[in-house]
Each structure stands twice: as structure tokens, then as C-alpha cells.
């Protein structure tokens, strides 16, 4: 019940395409859903986050879509660029300090 | 610049040896965390601390120990009891109140030789 399931494990997208990464959760107490971007050999960096009272949040080319009834949320990267190639983690928390992370998606954007 | 500094970047441990990973932050964050990252397994919580002189075990605390004597520092010791310590270790910090995002350090890659 504490898991966050992330898919796909890896993703290859052409430059200019849309990258979509999905996450699903079981614990309805989760109330904060961030996405992190990690480049090789570096720590993850907060990319964008959403609370369950909204269905979508957009920041530049990055959009989170949130479906509370389905207990799913997804990251959309519009106009994907080679510089977006990284590993992406979704996460969830329930108002505590602790986050539950997904297993990560390795994105490669082809030039 | 505010941030989290982890050192060393690379660390090699011999069998039966304890090693300590350093984590220092100047963000004035109350909470600090240690995560272990293995390929295909995401980030797993080792220990976390909400205030000085207090810390709690995470999901995989066996074979690890921590201390929190100063707000800025949260060192992690990987003991000889940790049978599979080769991994990428990440330290993070956050504001204590409310579900805010973490700030991560750049990590320490530990390898057993």
C-alpha cells in the first residue's frame, strides 16, 4: 500500500516528441506528488509537483496530470529535447517528512 | 550559494571496514535524510532526522548508523554489518513543516573492494 508504481522503466523519444511517464499509488492519504529529474552521477532535482486538489499543473514544457479517482499521475514532457535525457522519479508523501519514490524511468531523447 | 555538500564523491571500502559518508547543508533545513540508490530499485530510505539529536530508522537501516549533533550535519556510517554496501548514497534535506520538496546532494558512490 505504500508503494508507488512507475512505468515505463525506460523510454526512447525522438526530438520534438512527447515523453509520458506514469505513476500509480494505493495510499489515499498521499497528498503531495513531486517529480524529480536526475542526471548521471548527480543527485535528483525537484522538477515539478502537484497537490490532489488540482488535475493538472504546467511549468514550461513539463506538465503533471493527476487523476485522483484512478490514483494515477503522470509527467508529460512536451517538445522533448536531448538535454531532457535523464532518469525521472515520481514520489508521494502524506504530509510527513517521508517520501515514497517510484523506481525511476530512464529517458533518452534522440537528436 | 545554499545547498547540500556530500563527500567524498567516490569511496572504496575493504571487507570488514566501517566507512563514514559526510553530508553538510547550509539551507537551514530542519530535516535531513539518507537514501540508497540501486539500479532498478529507486531510492530507499535509510535514516532520517527531523531535529538535532533525534533520528529514526527508515526502510533499510540495518548495517547503517547516523548521528545528528548539529543542524547542518548528518553523517552516515556504513558498518561491516552491511553485507552489500556497494551503491550510490544520497543525502537530502527539507523544511520541516509541510510537504515540501527535498534538496539532494550530489551523492557518494561507495564500492566494496
Image (cartoon, grey):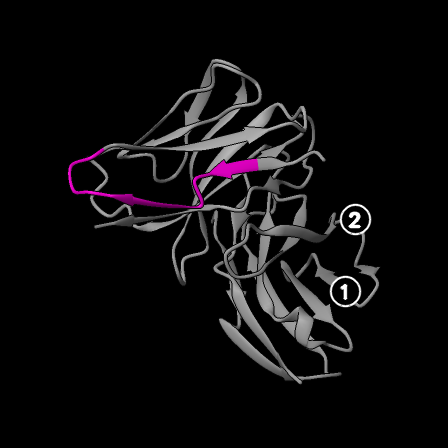
Magenta-highlighted residues: B5-17
Q: Nearer the viewer, residue A38 or B54?
A: A38
**In this rendering, position of residue B53 left or right of residue B94:** left
- On screen, A106 above or below A109? above
Mark 2 packing: few (<14 Cα in 10 Å), some, or many (20+)?
Answer: few
Chain of the residue under the numbered disc 2 shown in the image:
A
Q: Nearer the viewer, residue A23 or B58?
A: B58
Any part of residue B92 in sight: no
Dividing the picture into quadrants, the one containing residue A47 is: bottom right
Dividing the picture into quadrants, the one containing residue B58 is: top left
Q: Position of residue B52 (x, y in %)?
A: 53, 15
Q: For marks 2 and 1, give the one nearer the viewer.
A: 1
Q: Which residue is mark 1?
A: A62
Q: Which residue is mark 2?
A: A53
Identify the secondary structure beneath mark 1.
strand
Q: Magenta stretch containing residue B14, yes or no?
A: yes
Amino acid at each position: 500500500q505504500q508503494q508507488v508504481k512507475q512505468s515505463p522503466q525506460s523510454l526512447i523519444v525522438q526530438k520534438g516528441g512527447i515523453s509520458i511517464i506514469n505513476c500509480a499509488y494505493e495510499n489515499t492519504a498521499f497528498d503531495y506528488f513531486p517529480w524529480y529529474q536526475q542526471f548521471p552521477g548527480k543527485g535528483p532535482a525537484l522538477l515539478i509537483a502537484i497537490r490532489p486538489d488540482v488535475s493538472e499543473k504546467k511549468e514550461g514544457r513539463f506538465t503533471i496530470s493527476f487523476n485522483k479517482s484512478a490514483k494515477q499521475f503522470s509527467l508529460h514532457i512536451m517538445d522533448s529535447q536531448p538535454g531532457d535525457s535523464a532518469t525521472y522519479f515520481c514520489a508521494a508523501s502524506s504530509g510527513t517528512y517521508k517520501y515514497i519514490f517510484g523506481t525511476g524511468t530512464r529517458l533518452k531523447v534522440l537528436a | 550559494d545554499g545547498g547540500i555538500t556530500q563527500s567524498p564523491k567516490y569511496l572504496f571500502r575493504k571487507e570488514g571496514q566501517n566507512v563514514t559518508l559526510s553530508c553538510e547543508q547550509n539551507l537551514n533545513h530542519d530535516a535531513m535524510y539518507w537514501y540508497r540508490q540501486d539500479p532498478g530499485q529507486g531510492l530507499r530510505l535509510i535514516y532520517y532526522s527531523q531535529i538535532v539529536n533525534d533520528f529514526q530508522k527508515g526502510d533499510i537501516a540495518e548495517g547503517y548508523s547516523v548521528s545528528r549533533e548539529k543542524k547542518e550535519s548528518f553523517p552516515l556510517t556504513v558498518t561491516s554489518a552491511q553485507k552489500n554496501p556497494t551503491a550510490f548514497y544520497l543525502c537530502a534535506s527539507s523544511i520541516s513543516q509541510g510537504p515540501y520538496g527535498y534538496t539532494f546532494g550530489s551523492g557518494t558512490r561507495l564500492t566494496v573492494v
